Image (tube, rainbow, N blue to C red):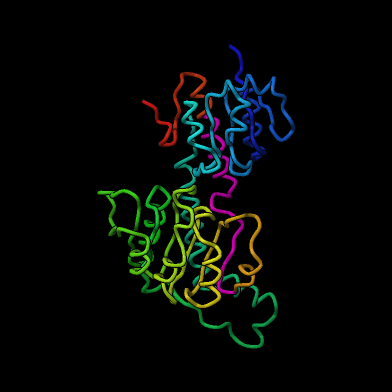
Amino acid sequence: MMIPDVVVAAPLPPVTMAALDAAFTVHRLWEGVSDDVLARVRGMAASTLAGPVGTALLDRLPALEIIANFGVGYDNIDISAAVARRLMVTNTAGVLDEEVADLTLGLLLATLRRIPAAERFVREGRWVQGGFPLSPSLRGRRVGIVGLGGIGKAIARRLEGFAVDIAWHGRSPQPDALWPRYASVETLAQACDVLIVIVPGGPATRHLIDAGVLAALGPNGVLINVSRGTVVDETALIAALQSGAILAAGLDVFEHEPHIPEALLACENAVLLPHLGSASDITRAAMGQLMIDNLSAWFADGRALSPVAETRYA
């Protein structure tokens, strides 16, 4: 039996690269791969680190059958082009939910209790001059979650332990959800003073959180974004942070990461992280294994373990 040819779009964690090399004939796109080789490639390991997977690249892969994405979000892939070619697209849904939810709660607490600023206060020797200023609190707040998928539900379960009120907004009703649903992001923001965003990226959600939503959140409001940077209008957010239209923001993602506007870096009421949501060794290894398992299952019998919604072909 011939070992399938797989192209890897960008470097992945060493443990994942080693497992790919053990299972397939691997071609590293960043090292340069000839069109003759690409012509026999049947699978792709993609990731947001590699940039877009669009028609220009897909046209060079006439034998491609499956794109296995390293990550739950797949806005890096031109899904319309993939569907037009009847390609299978998979992601790593499920295996990173708990890790991202943990990070979200850490970011929320760091933002409200000003933990990074307090740590700098100690390191800079300022404690001897007096105590750190009092911070806002999570106590008594109502938290709205924009997007109640697997990660959103994991965040909500954790929030229940903090005895705060929880509400949510999403595209579709979820009869099993234990928390009230609001019809729009803006009405959710009006009802809450913490807004946690965990929706997919892409054109449908671009600038979903805009100046109107931030105004509805209000001067005591806190925005937490652990989804994609494009979901938040970064210019409007900077203006809201500078003017006091909202209290604070905790951001793990940015519109043009890793590049962050100087104006946002200067905002003392923002906690900024370098896209750490799933970035633990155990979770990244699990993501890599699911990606490889999707490729292996597909080549073995034409099935995928975690297809994205658009490519769950009948």
Q: Is residue 307 above or below residue 190?
A: above
The residue sitting at the bottom extreme is 129
Give the position of the N terminus as an image quadrant: top right
Residue at left offset 47%, top offset 29% = 84
In the rendered structure, the answer to whether residue 263 lies left or right of residue 219 reads right
Residue 145, picture quadrant? bottom left
Residue at left offset 39%, top offset 61% = 159
Asked if residue 286 is among those painted magenta in the image, a careful observer would answer yes
The residue sitting at the left extreme is 175
Near-viewer residue (183 or 161): 183
In the rendered structure, the answer to whether residue 108 lies left or right of residue 148 reads right
In the rendered structure, the answer to whether residue 250 lies left or right of residue 128 reads left
Asked if residue 253 is among those painted magenta in the image, a careful observer would answer no
Return the x and y of residue 132 as percentages of the image width and height: 58, 82
Near-viewer residue (148 or 113): 148
Residue 142, picture quadrant? bottom left
Near-viewer residue (104 or 72): 72
The residue sitting at the top extreme is 1
Return the x and y of residue 248 as percentages of the image width and height: 51, 72
Q: Is residue 101 above or below residue 192?
A: above
Return the x and y of residue 187 as percentages of the image width and height: 33, 65
Near-viewer residue (47 or 294): 47
Give the position of the C terminus as an image quadrant: top left
Residue at left offset 50%, top offset 29% = 294
Return the x and y of residue 174 as percentages of the image width and height: 28, 49
Q: Is residue 304 above or below residue 171?
A: above
Count up the numbered dots: 0
In the image, the segment drawn in magenta is 268-293
In the rendered structure, the answer to whether residue 160 lies left or right of residue 281 reads left
